Image (cartoon, rainbow, N blue to C red):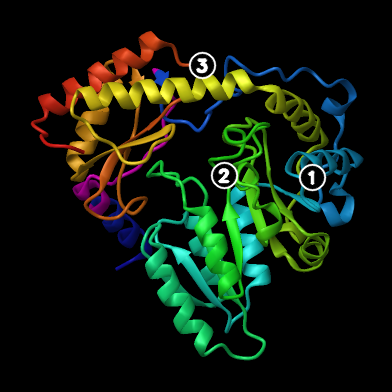
């Protein structure tokens, strides 16, 4: 079989499974993106930034000629926001997670990772070649079983790590972070928290769940992205000054990546000013997702989690695709999420609620969803 035949065969298999993907322009009211606070659309206050628009920094890595003084300002502002010792900017959340994990975790180290952690965490662990323990989603007993067994036979010079998301991207539920921190301390493990979907939306100033719970000094690092609720390019790590220095010297995802342009740094500074004051946006987001969850419950549609990511699990891939198409035909941009993005048998609609959705839009979405599920003969609680 030639390589083109191999590719064609794989694509045909995906089509037959209902898992074929394609790129398309967005149409309809946005219930798909991670623009939770509406900064990517109607609520952004980002302004033109003059000379920085013509600045050409960013055409080399930060260690060569790609660094610009504005990133020092951004990192200082982020450190103050999180009350963290240090911040290191990265180009994307994927690069931040994969780079952090593959740099600091060594072969022979042991890592407990929630089974529903994002693909970038999984890929980082593959690169690290560590011993992995996948614990059942948010199952503290299973996590402790693994920690206890490994702690008893711990080898000299080998470290224990726990990695979890704070808000899970496909299930809309929160990790029990307080309890995980306590387990990490009990068994001398280091905790890394991916705050991608929580940053901007939790805490008095929006800095995330770790800060909301007062756990900043009890974790090794947290990972944050700008490309979701914050509406800006790039991502960053909140960590110690020593870890930042180590990553600058050893993290291939930083050393060999072209830096972000300076104009993106100006956007970060403007966004930080807005998000820290945006109590109204966070309150509106909570009001909107509470309304949708209550409305769906009235239609006997019970969805997991309790946040602005609302998974409607339909099980079979064709059902999820059919109901998504029904919603798209009604003017709502809702997509079907299928394996391997989610476990087999849990194909779903992932509904993303935003602060700038109107009550009318939310009500009509709920009605269209209930209609689509009924039309396609799907019964029972979801």
**Which residue is pictured at 65% across the width and 61% down the height?**
99
Dot 3 corresponds to which residue?
A: 356
Q: Crowding at label 3, few (<14), some or many (≥20) Cα neighbours within 10 Å?
A: some
Mark closest to the chain's N terminus, 2 or 1: 1
CA separation in Å, label 1 and label 3? 28 Å
Query: Which residue is situated farthest in the top direction here?
Result: 360
Q: Is residue 318 left or right of residue 52?
A: left
Labelled disc at residue 79: 1
**Please, what is the dominant secondary structure of the magenta stretch?**
loop
Residue placed most toward the observer, 290 or 60? 290
State the CA–CA distance, disc 2 to disc 1: 16 Å
Q: Quadrant of residue 240?
A: bottom right
Q: Quadrant of residue 21?
A: top left
* Residue 72 spot, x, y in % from top left: 87, 44
**In 3D space, how far apart are the residues under numbered discs 2 and 3 (Cα atoms)?**
20 Å
- What's the residue at 47%, 51% (across, down)? 175
Range of magenta residues: 13-28
Residue 196 is marked as 2
Relative side of 65 to 22, left or right: right
Quadrant location, the C terminus = top left
Q: Residue at x 45, y 44 (%)?
A: 169
Query: Secondary structure under badge 1?
Result: helix
- Where, by quadrant of the figure, is residue 204 drawn? top right
In the foreground, 211 or 87: 211
Question: Sequence-wise, which precedes: disc 1 or disc 3?
Answer: 1
Image coordinates for residue 254, horizontal then vertical, percent:
74, 57
Point out the tag, 2 or 3, that comes first from the N-terminus: 2
Labels 2 & 3 near each other (Cβ < 8 A): no
Q: Name the element at disc 3.
A: loop
With 189 as the anchor, is 327 left or right in this view?
Answer: left
* Residue 78, magenta (yes or no): no
Residue 104, horizontal then vertical, whole percent? 68, 70
């Amino acid at each position: 079989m030639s390589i083109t035949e191999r590719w064609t065969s794989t694509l045909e298999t995906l089509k037959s499974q209902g898992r074929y993907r394609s790129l398309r322009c967005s149409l309809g009211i946005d219930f798909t993106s991670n623009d939770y606070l509406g900064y990517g659309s109607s609520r952004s206050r980002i302004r033109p930034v003059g000379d920085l628009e013509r600045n050409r920094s960013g055409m080399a890595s930060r260690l060569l000629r790609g660094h610009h003084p504005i990133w020092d300002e951004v990192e200082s502002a982020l450190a103050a926001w999180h009350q963290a010792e240090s911040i290191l900017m990265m180009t994307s959340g994927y690069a931040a997670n994969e780079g952090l994990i593959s740099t600091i975790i060594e072969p022979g180290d042991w890592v407990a990772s929630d089974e529903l952690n994002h693909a970038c965490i999984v890929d980082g662990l593959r690169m690290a070649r560590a011993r992995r323990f996948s614990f059942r989603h948010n199952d503290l007993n299973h996590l402790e079983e693994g920690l206890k067994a490994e702690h008893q036979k711990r080898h000299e010079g080998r470290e224990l790590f726990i990695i979890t998301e704070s808000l899970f991207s496909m299930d809309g539920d929160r990790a029990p972070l307080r309890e995980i921190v306590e387990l990490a301390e009990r068994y001398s493990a280091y905790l890394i928290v991916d705050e991608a979907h929580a940053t901007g939306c939790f805490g008095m100033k929006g800095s995330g769940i770790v800060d909301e719970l007062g756990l900043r000094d009890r974790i090794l690092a947290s990972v944050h992205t700008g490309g979701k609720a914050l509406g800006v390019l790039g991502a960053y790590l909140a960590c110690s000054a020593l870890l930042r220095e180590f990553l600058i010297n050893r993290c291939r995802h930083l050393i060999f990546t072209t830096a972000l342009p300076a104009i993106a740094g100006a956007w970060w500074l403007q966004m930080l000013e807005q998000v820290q004051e945006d109590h109204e946006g966070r309150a509106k987001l909570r009001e909107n997702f509470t309304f949708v969850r209550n409305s769906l419950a009235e239609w006997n549609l019970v969805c997991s989690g309790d946040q602005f990511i609302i998974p409607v699990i339909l099980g079979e891939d064709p059902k999820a695709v059919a109901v998504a198409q029904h919603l798209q035909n009604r003017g709502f941009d809702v997509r079907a999420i299928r394996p391997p993005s989610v476990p087999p048998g849990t194909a779903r609609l992932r509904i993303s609620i935003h602060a700038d959705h109107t009550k009318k839009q939310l009500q009509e979405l709920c009605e269209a969803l209930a209609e689509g599920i009924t039309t396609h003969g799907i019964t029972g609680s979801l």
